[in-house]
Amino acid sequence: AGGTFVPAVVIGTGYGAAVSALRLGEAGVSTLMLEMGQLWNQPGPDGNVFSGMLKPDKRSSWFKTRTEAPLGSFLWLDLANRDIDPYAGVLDRVNFDQMSVYVGRGVGGGSLVNGGMAVTPRRSYFEEVLPQVDAAEMYDRYFPRANSTLRVGNIDKKWFEETEWYKFARVSREQASKAGLSTTFVPNVYDWEYMKREAEGSVPKSALDAEVIYGNNHGKVSLDKSYLAAALGTGKVTIETLHQVKTIRQQKDGNYLLTVEQKDADGKLLATKEISCRHLFLGAGSLGSTELLLRARETGTLPNLSSEVGAGWGPNGNIMTARANHMWNPTGTKQSSIPALGIDDWDNPDAPVFAEIAPMPAGLETWVSLYLAITKNPQRGTFVYNAAKDRADLRWTREQNAPAVAAAKSLFDRINKANTTIYRYDLFGKQLKAFADDFCYHPLGGAVLGKATDNYGRVNGYKNLYVTDGALIPGSIGVNPFVTITALAERNIERVIKQDVTAK
Ligand code: FDA
């Protein structure tokens, strides 16, 4: 019994997973990564790997019959979405009762679909959120390691000031400054030099051709080009794609036995496999890792898991909103899809907000200023196991997002007042709606560090079982989260390899 044996299995290929696999590989540990999505390296019929935002096809979405874009409407018309065939596409929108969560599917996880904004959190807030983690060690060693391995870079400020592609950001900066608010440049894993060449017309366009949430065909240094390429380069790491882990149980010898479904890209079941391992690392993301652990606890395959599994979830205070500019203040028909500026009002004691100035690359003038606000919302959700559907449901009500909306509103009311502008009410669905409070990009928590796990991600109740990803972070980090997820994974895996894996 026990199927194929490998020393270490990593579930998923997002940030936490990729860090763990690279460091295991470097330590000489044979490691198998299991990813439910595809490897995105084969061009489709149009010659591109990804389908782009303006004409999305089945490659855009994870088993949907219609795309589900975050900005579902324009002038209340559903212009952005298309009917598609169900397929193992790159972006998933997991729709819970009162909250929808966007996640990436494929080798690289969220790095395939995200905006690449690579932000190190303010140290004081990091210390508030994760007080038991040695911040000095994080800021001296693991944040720098994460930033350099992710290949985070900064925009050329002179180019930013000149280029038509960032006019939308300069307009928003000006309006923020009229309200006494300051902005900050945001580092990114997009190759800024490549973007300059896109603007010159010397290379194929990606950021400058409205590509981001359904994948970038060029320019972005996603994990498959950084951590995962290095992991494969150790010769110790292999990746199986279209392999979804369903169940985890512990055997008498202490090894873990996984049931894994292999499908084709159209969703047809090809095989159900059993794989066993000594060390098991969960890097399936906040939703994925939490669901696997909840299922194991509730169906009795890992009965000793703590009651903390499923608790402490939050959307990082995510609220989207948009303002309407005056006719004489256009935001530009040309907009880079990669954000470069954020309004930083995090030190505001009443309503801390870090708002990314988001593009709306529609190819025509919209007079829209769009924002993704990250707020500090103390509300938390809980995942519960739904036995009938064999999945995790999220207990989170729309009401719980009221503090986040209030914080975003207080900031953007100030900007509107200073500029005599108003909100846009037509972008977030069919009703009049100025704040999108029903979806998020930054799911965090569910197996929180120091609660469901020890202080290094070792799952309480079991040996050699680890959580490595966004599930560890208790619902909020104040900035876009992937640099923190990466740095924390670097910290944890270093300790785990030394003490649990290679120690004799
Ligand atoms: P992540 O979600 O990256 O990876 C999990 C992987 O596990 C996925 O590939 C999934 O398919 C796989 N998986 C899940 N269950 C499985 C199972 N049972 N078996 C096998 N595989 C399984 N952040 C940021 O810092 N800057 C930004 O600009 C943005 N922008 C942004 C835009 C959009 C559209 C989205 C959706 C998200 C962002 N984010 C972001 C958020 C960021 O992408 C996110 O926080 C990280 O990807 C989370 O990393 P994890 O390692 O937790 O998991």
Image (spheres, grey):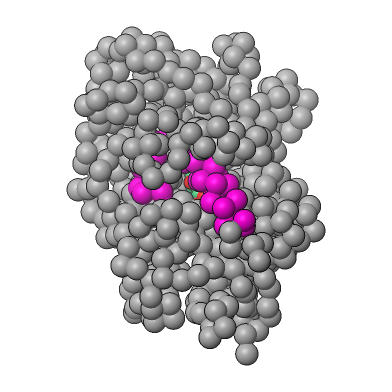
Q: Nearer the viewer, residue 164 or 390?
A: 390
Q: How many marks?
A: 0
Q: Nearer the viewer, residue 27 or 487?
A: 27
Q: Position of residue 251 (x, y in %)?
A: 54, 83
Residue 240 in view in this figure: yes
**Left or right of 95 in this view: 408:** left
Q: Position of residue 365 (x, y in %)?
A: 48, 23
Give yes or no for residue 488 being in the magenta stretch.
yes
- Quarter of the image where the N terminus is located: bottom right
Q: Position of residue 378 (x, y in %)?
A: 25, 43
Residue 63 in view in this figure: no
Please determine whether, in this image, residue 473 is positioned above or below residue 153. Answer: below
Please determine whether, in this image, residue 351 is positioned above or below residue 91. Answer: above
Task: Please report the residue visible at 22 percent of the width from the left and 39 percent of the height from the top.
Answer: 403
Picture quadrant where residue 327 is located: top left
Q: Which residues are magenta?
A: 471-498
Task: Please report the residue visible at 39 percent of the width from the left and 23 percent of the height from the top.
Answer: 344
Q: Residue furthest front?
A: 504
**Left or right of 174 in this view: 18:** right
Q: Nearer the viewer, residue 224 or 251?
A: 251
**Left or right of 382 in this view: 169:** right
Task: Please report the residue visible at 55 percent of the width from the left and 46 percent of the height from the top.
Answer: 491
**Left or right of 39 in this view: 443:** left
Q: Position of residue 370 (x, y in %)?
A: 40, 29
Give yes or no for residue 374 being in the magenta stretch.
no
- Quarter of the image where the C terminus is located: bottom right
Classified by dominant secondary structure, the portion drawn in magenta counts as: helix
